[in-house]
Image (cartoon, rainbow, N blue to C red):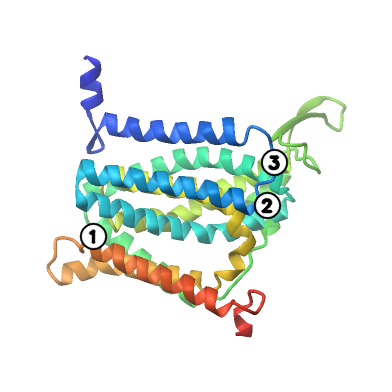
Amino acid sequence: MDLMTVFLADWLGKPAWMWLAFMGVVVALLALDLGVLHRDQHEIGVRESLLLSGMYIAIALLFGAWVWWELGGQSGLEYLTGFAIEKSLAMDNVFVIAMIFGYFAIPRALQHRVLFWGILGVIVLRALMIGAGAALVSQYGWVLYIFAAFLVFTGIKMFLAGEGHADVGANPLVRWMRGHLRITDTLHGQKFFVRQPDSKGRMVLWATPMFLALVMIEIADVIFAVDSVPAIFAITTDPYIVYTSNIFAILGLRALYFALAAVIHRFAYLKQALAVLLVFIGGKIFVADLLGWEKFPAEWSLAITAVILSTGVLWSLWKTRSNGGDPTLS
């Protein structure tokens, strides 16, 4: 088998070279991020965060333009819609990440390192979840309706739920790790593990709070993906579009986190907008069937998604414009 045959071989509905090209871009971005831009550990400010995020969004949109050119307008619209939805849903995860960093007292200068290694885990975990989802949908078409109903239910539940703050310390996994692993009381620079003497004087491996924060962020992403992955499958069942839009959105969010964490209180009504978005994404599957459409128009999906999200963001900014970020004072 020659090299050309390998490159042209079908893999999840697309030639292998398209997957290799995407992974090449991701690897290059990660190498640039860790090896060049953040070779030294430093605190990422709002300006640097916005510039990095702008770079990631520009690259994601350029990739979307290439998808449009290579696969056609329908695939291009589905990629852009999936990217917008994933990016928006991921913003809600900033609350959780900020709580985890706060609980484990991870300074801003070290947070990028945790998020960088966290994204490597996300790339693998999302691949497994999307691969499993694609296999289910292709084998059993009715699974898509289960995804849709789940999104509608989740959206309604999210809309009606009050603003709660989870106690990271009470999380069962945190309690289990503290009970079964050797955990240092303090941070040891940027290290996830250190060698220290145990109670008997033996030099053994200890995990640091940096490692616990990394594990909790990975678990938070898995829980978050339970909503986001079905949402993308409700837009398109093409594994290539689902995976690439997912990963590009998450890559950029990691850069945007440092700016968002400082102003997240201004997006007081984003959760409600995301809830409406989930209901729309799930509901359009049933609407298309009722109207006898083969598929809900991709351009409509993108336009309605943009309206829902922009309304939520603008309303949030208006309600918190002059009250210190507290919408109840408006």
Tell which residue pokes out farthest to the bottom in this image. 330
The residue at the point 81 percent across, 25 percent down is 203
The residue at the point 23 percent across, 49 percent down is 75
Whether 83 is drawn above or below 243: the answer is below
Q: CA distance from mark 2 to mark 3?
A: 16 Å
Percent across and percent down for residue 93 are 54, 58
Percent across and percent down for residue 126 are 42, 44
Q: Secondary structure at mark 3?
A: loop
The reply to whether residue 61 is in sight is: yes
Percent across and percent down for residue 225 are 45, 53
The residue at the point 32 percent across, 57 percent down is 81
- Tell me the quarter of the picture where residue 24 sits: top left
Query: Horizontal placement of 316 versus 132: left or right?
Result: right
Give the residue number, with chain letter if any, for mark 1: 298
Whether 195 is drawn above or below 26: the answer is above
Query: Horizontal placement of 293 versus 151: left or right?
Result: left
Give the residue number, with chain letter if any, for mark 3: 42
